[in-house]
Image (cartoon, grey):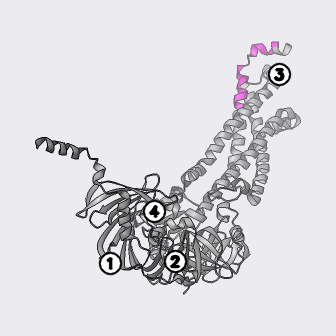
Amino acid sequence: MKRLLTILLLACSLIPVSAQFPDGRELLQKIDGNMSSENRIFTSSMIIYGRRSTHTVKMKTWTAGEKKSFTEYLFPAREQGTKMLKLEEQLWIYSPSTDRIIQIAGHMLRQSVMGSDLSYEDLMEDNSLVRQYNANVTGTEVVDGRQCWVVDLKAIVPDIAYQGMKLWVDRERNIPLREEMYAKSGTLLKRTELSDVQKIGNRWYPRKILFRDMLRDGKGTEFIIEEIEFNVTIPEHIFSKASLKK
Amino acid sequence: MIRFLFKGLIRDRNRSLLPFLVTTIGVMLTVVFHAWITGVINNSIEFSARFSSGHVKVMTRAYAENAAQSPNDLAILGADTLLEALSASNPGMDFASRIYFAGLIDVPDSTGETRAQGPAMGIAIDLLSGNNAEMERMNIPSSIRSGRLPSAGKEALLSSEFAGKLGLNPGDTFTLVGTSMLGELTMYNFILSGTVEFGTTALDRGTLIADLSDVREALNMTDATGEVLGFFRSGVYSDELAADVRERFNSRYSSDEDEFSPVMKSLSEQNNMGFLVEYSGKLQSILITVFILAMSLILWNAGLLGGLRRYGEFGMRLAIGEEKSHVYKTMLLESLIIGFFASLTGLAFGMLIAYYLQEHGVDLGMMMKNASIMMPRVFRAQITPWTWLAGFIPGFVSTQIGTMLAGAGIYKRQTAQLFKELES
């Protein structure tokens, strides 16, 4: 009996540590199951904590897949009626005060939206992690009192905003609670803290995300989802330039 | 005595021609060089003051740290009150708010779609209040190439070359796409009232000039300004006066504790202008010293040659009983006459050339085709009271020193040897 126990203990110690962690790809699929959807409509607020002052922007966004997105600003009055349409890598912005639709060049998609810590890509894209990254679970840590997997992501597609990511994924709910986004050089570009995770339908979803652009001063931007609907029918005409002036 | 020596110099040109020509050419070159360098330095300082730095500039401390990027999110709030306070406490100066900003000029086609785009560097100044000081300061009225000055809100000027590239003509509408003080993307329509050409590559490449109130509206900067520029009414920058104004302002308004408190910087503290200001102050003494040294050496040499040629003459004069000191004094007196007239002649020719360069200038635009720094394209010489002295005094003094050095040989002549020398 003693010999059997010794053999069992030895066998357990020989199992690689990584075998105790979930498969990276499977974990990303579970995260995508929570965070991504075929399409969605949400109303959100951005509280932008600047170096000098704080201001709030409210907007409504329609997103279909990874390539189509339409956003209308609701608040403040100065921005009300401003609309943005993103199709593939092209972005058009309509400003009611000038009654002009202006196309923004591709590289501008990585610029700040309304002085916030979010880029147009951050705001308007709903990309599947599993299609963009290889994942490797490297450990466990506690974030906000919850057990998390620590996951390193490496991009597998070219021309992507963040070549590397590090996620702290809630082990129970499969939702990231903290993210770090890196450039190809390894420079930390952004950090996010995801909170107020709620059950919406059959998925977990964070209602509040604090974005910190690590390359600029400021106290970050709080992105709050006020209302969100997943997989609802969005009329195709929403994603047309004609809808910008409506 | 002087008349006697003068006649001698005129009749025996071998005695006077070489030192006269050397001194004349030297003085002429010094005058031209002095006027040119003074002009180039002062053109650069004044150009920088008018377009960028002012004689003094007020910004917030945070803005001043990255002033080259014109970070308008860190702009001065309550700008109009500050402007009033500055004007009240510095009656010898004029102050003006300016906003420097970057943006994209978007030109629509007939359907309102983007037809052309180009990056612009914007300057917002007071164009419409009726006070033309800023327009005059930036030489805008005489820089108009087509159209007219803005006369109403939402009218703006573009640099001529830039407007041409975008296919814009006076009367056309274009949209400024920029970033507001809060970092928001903003769009604002302007009507092109006219085009300007400053003769400065950095400005002519892509400048938008609009009224302060329009740009405040466009960039969401109500009662805010990026910078307040101060100018001495005399139009001449004085580092001492600027330092005094700066000290008084900073001790009253600026605080290390508050990064948004205003701070004043003098021209010499901005854009590495300190070197130019300091160099400008020392220019006269540098030029005079170099000139005196160089000319003294040349004239010493010329004096030695003359001395050799007149070796026999001096020997004869000493042999018949003339005192060495008297021979030496007459030499000095001769050089005094040569120095005086040569300096006057050199000064006259130099001033003529300097005046031509002052009036017409030299267009160095081709040499600065790709320069990104703000420098005038046409540089002009500048004649100052110092230019007269910088040429005349060294010309006059160096002939004396040259002769003094060359003539020292007279005292080495041995009286006992003179007749032997004469016999031989």
Pinpoint residue B292: horizontal percent, then vertical percent. Answer: 68, 39
Residue beneath label 1, please? A201
The answer to whether residue B260 is left or right of residue A15 is right
Circles 3 and 2, Cβ within 8 Å, touching? The answer is: no
How far apart in space, not on screen, are marks 3 and 4 (Cα)? 105 Å
How far apart in space, not on screen, are marks 1 and 4 (Cα)? 24 Å
Q: Which mark is residue B312?
A: 3
Task: Using the rendered image, report if marks 3 and 2 lie on a common chain.
Answer: no
Q: Residue at x 26, y 47 (%)?
A: A15
Task: Using the rendered image, report if marks 1 and 3 lie on a common chain.
Answer: no
Circles 2 and 4, Cβ within 8 Å, touching? The answer is: no
Q: Can see residue B83?
A: no
Label 2 marks a residue whose chain is A
Q: Main secondary structure of the magenta part?
A: helix
Nearest the viewer among A164 and A46 is A164
Task: Using the rendered image, report if marks 2 and 4 lie on a common chain.
Answer: yes
Dot 3: element: helix
